[in-house]
Image: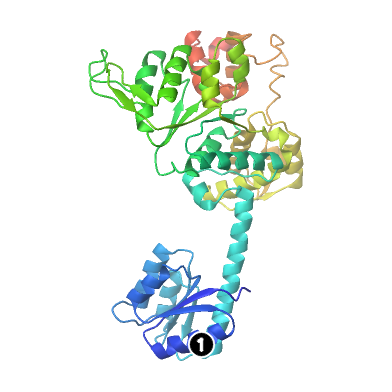
Amino acid sequence: MNNRLKILIVDDEKRITDKLKFHLEKIGFTVDTANTPNEGFKKLEEEPELLILDVMLPGMNGLEMLKKIKADYPRLEVVMISGYGDMDMVIQAMRSGASDFIRKPFQIMDIQLAVERTGKFIELQSRLLDMQNKQSLISKELESLIEKDFVGESDSIKRVLDIALKAAKDKDVNVLVTGENGTGKEVVSRIIHYASPRKKNVFAPVNSSAIPESLLESEFFGHIKGAFTDAKEDKVGYFEMANYGTLFLDEVAEMPHNLQTKLLRAIEEKKIKRVGSNKEIPVDVRIISATNKNVERLIGEHKFRMDLFHRINTIEINIPPLRERRSDIELILRHFVSSLSKKKGVESPEISPELIRKLRAYHFPGNVRELRNMVERALILSESNVLLPEDFPLRQEIESISNKDNRYATLDLEKNELRLIEEALRQADFNQTRAAELLNVSRDVVKRKIKKHNINIVKDIFND
């Protein structure tokens, strides 16, 4: 056990605090004392790891002090001491967060044993937290800010995190995050923002393909009242909204060419003009972009501006697909089983070795997102306390579209757009999100293509 534990003793009897301080310091602990609640609260700012707290204090009951302390310092362990140790008081103290309760009069050895017990618990909690942080790769504080999980132990995913955290330190560098759908591009982008000096300002996510082309300029740069027919009041655009923070451009490769030009100018000049206004507004924004496309190929096809690519791509972070880091699959599986079970208020089931072997052999076209969806489905439908291979039915390889229809060799949206969308919708039981995953595009792209081809989402139209 760690005898360098920092201890604070709060008791209105100075002879008790002095005696405990002398004895605990003699055996190696670091001890401070206070004889009033106000003095105790002040010394809590020095972040002790263990508090020994008397119940009867001048001006404030120790139980009231305990509740306030646990609200402000939830990880601080508290041992209560009192000469009025009836069972109701003990229960109240434990419910309020005390880890132990010692009745007066007590022997010095009683306090020493309580300190040693609590010290072992603190050490165990510290080790557990270290293990959790190693699995999650990021601190719990950062994880709570991004409201997502980042789990893995493979060298490739650790490199992703290392580059992201280095990029975060420079508040101005623009970052391009690439990778297949479901790999966690927005999660990595949020990590960069919340680990950076801009973390107290806005993280503004924008789906570049979801905005109607007629509204693109207004959405990004805002407009003034009367700028066009529906402009009934002034509007703040994404650049102003994200000022001093981060603008996250998801699916940046889907951005129309005319907006690319205006975006480039805004990034270079750090100024924007609202639609209908001649007034320049200075903006200080970090740009993080994400795409699952090969942008360099799009540049060669004159679909993406090379100069914009270089502006948004000072640092590129490529997230490997799950099939290229199979050593992470079991860890991610166990993480999702535990976290989703807790979220649903059910007991976390065991995981059969056969299931792990099955998932390790699967190619995961939907990556981490697909695995999460599999776990959630299994937790809802399984009637056993052990997750088995049959609880995780795997969809066909994307290339094997249909045994009875060989019209398509691949779900290449560019080559066979209309028929592929119809086939993907059929396989997905007309669920547009699942169809988008099959096509390896976003749901918004599928919606636009459905509208473009005037596809009616009625099952009968697909019947032979």
Please give left or right for residue 411 compared with residue 312 in the image.
Answer: right
Residue ID for mark 1: 22
Of the pair 379 and 70, the residue shown nearer to us: 70
Residue 458 rendering spot, x and y as whole percentages = 50, 14
Label 1 sits on what residue type? Phe
Q: Is mark 1 on a helix, strand or loop?
A: helix
Residue 442 rendering spot, x and y as whole percentages = 54, 23
- Residue occupying image coordinates x 48% and y 12%: 257
Residue 72, compared with residue 291, is above or below; it is: below
- Residue occupying image coordinates x 51% and y 22%: 252
Residue 25 rendering spot, x and y as whole percentages = 54, 83
Q: How many labels does the image show?
A: 1
Q: Can I make out residue 454 in this image? A: no
Examine the image and state in which quarter residue 416 appears. Answer: top right
- Residue occupying image coordinates x 44% and y 27%: 206
- Residue occupying image coordinates x 44% and y 43%: 199
Q: Quarter holding the N terminus?
A: bottom right
Badge 1: few (under 14), some or many (20 or more) residues near its Cα, within 10 Å?
few
Q: Can I make out residue 206 in this image? A: yes
Residue 125, compared with residue 348, is above or below; it is: below
Q: Quarter holding the C terminus?
A: top right
Please give left or right for residue 256 compared with residue 218 in the image.
Answer: right
Of the pair 166 and 35, the residue shown nearer to us: 166
Of the pair 377 and 80, the residue shown nearer to us: 80
